[in-house]
Amino acid sequence: MRLREFMGGVVLIVLALTTAQAAMTHDPKDDLRTEAVIDRRVALPPVSSPLIEADKVLASAYFDTMGILSTNNECSRFFGGPAVAVDAFSRLAGRVRKDHAAPEIGMGMSGATENFFNVQTKQEYRLFEKVVLNANGPFYRGPAAGSAPARRLGSFEPNTRAARALIFLHELGHMVKGANGKWLLPNDGGNEGLSRRNSITIENVCADELHGLGGSQAGRDLARRVKAEEELALPQSASAPEF
């Protein structure tokens, strides 16, 4: 018994020395590399729509939302985790078209649906045939002087970064199926009361991420990083003729 205790003491001493040595040789750059791994949980797909590249407001909202969904947090976990959330949102964004509708409408999806199954997460989601973003609604327009109060999105004023991200996340909730076999958000087309309750549901889950967008640079930083990576991925011009 004494021999075992002695050997255990040796192991503890070795571990203590190893820990001390690691602390003495700590490289601050390791923290940056670790943060980069934590920050980038899943690989982001290329921007899926020319409209996003042409519309600065839409692009900002896209990268804000992608920044939320691509990291491991309560909001992304609600949608099944970063892998399925990024996959589904990328496909949603690829079908977005702009049109004009009643001012209270932010975004709508309609038409036939196509079902997808994420093999990695065993998660199911659907994609609607038509995805329309209202150019006359709260995504782009705030309250005008002398007009009636504009519709708020949850607790957010219209035409703000948080409101735009909430609009995207709301629609994503209609696409992803939960563990109970039901869509995360029930269909609310034509039912304004239910639509508002669905928005509140998303805001309650994603409160930290949405409220943090006000002064955050995360979306802009993510956009610059994705653009830089896409440029690096482009084939380089040949330095000599091919035969």
Image (spheres, rainbow, N blue to C red):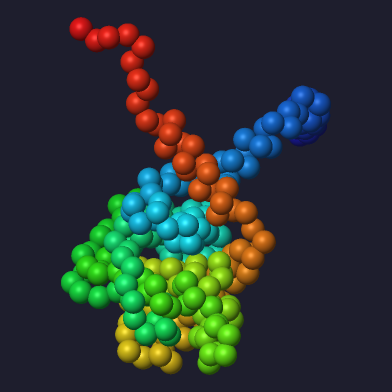
Q: Which quadrant of the view contains residue 73?
A: bottom right
Q: Which quadrant of the view contains residue 209?
A: bottom right
Q: Residue at x 32, y 89 (%)?
A: 190
Instruction: Judge from the rendering whether residue 88 lies leftward or rightward of residue 161; answer left or right.
Output: left
Q: Is residue 137 visible?
A: yes
Q: Position of residue 105 (x, y in %)?
A: 40, 82
Q: Position of residue 237 (x, y in %)?
A: 35, 20
For the N terminus, the image quarter is top right
Q: Nearer the viewer, residue 122 or 5?
A: 122
Instruction: Judge from the rendering whether residue 158 lies leftward or rightward of residue 19; answer left or right.
Output: left
Instruction: Judge from the rendering whether residue 2 lies leftward or rightward of residue 159; answer left or right.
Output: right
Residue 39 vs 199, above or below: the answer is: above
Q: Residue at x 63, y 69 (%)?
A: 211
Q: How many marks?
A: 0
Q: Position of residue 22 (x, y in %)?
A: 75, 28
Q: Position of residue 116 (x, y in %)?
A: 25, 60
Q: Is residue 184 visible?
A: no
Q: Residue at x 34, y 52 (%)?
A: 50
For the C terminus, the image quarter is top left
In the image, farthest residue toward the front: 146
In the image, farthest residue toward the left: 112
Q: Residue at x 45, y 69 (%)?
A: 169
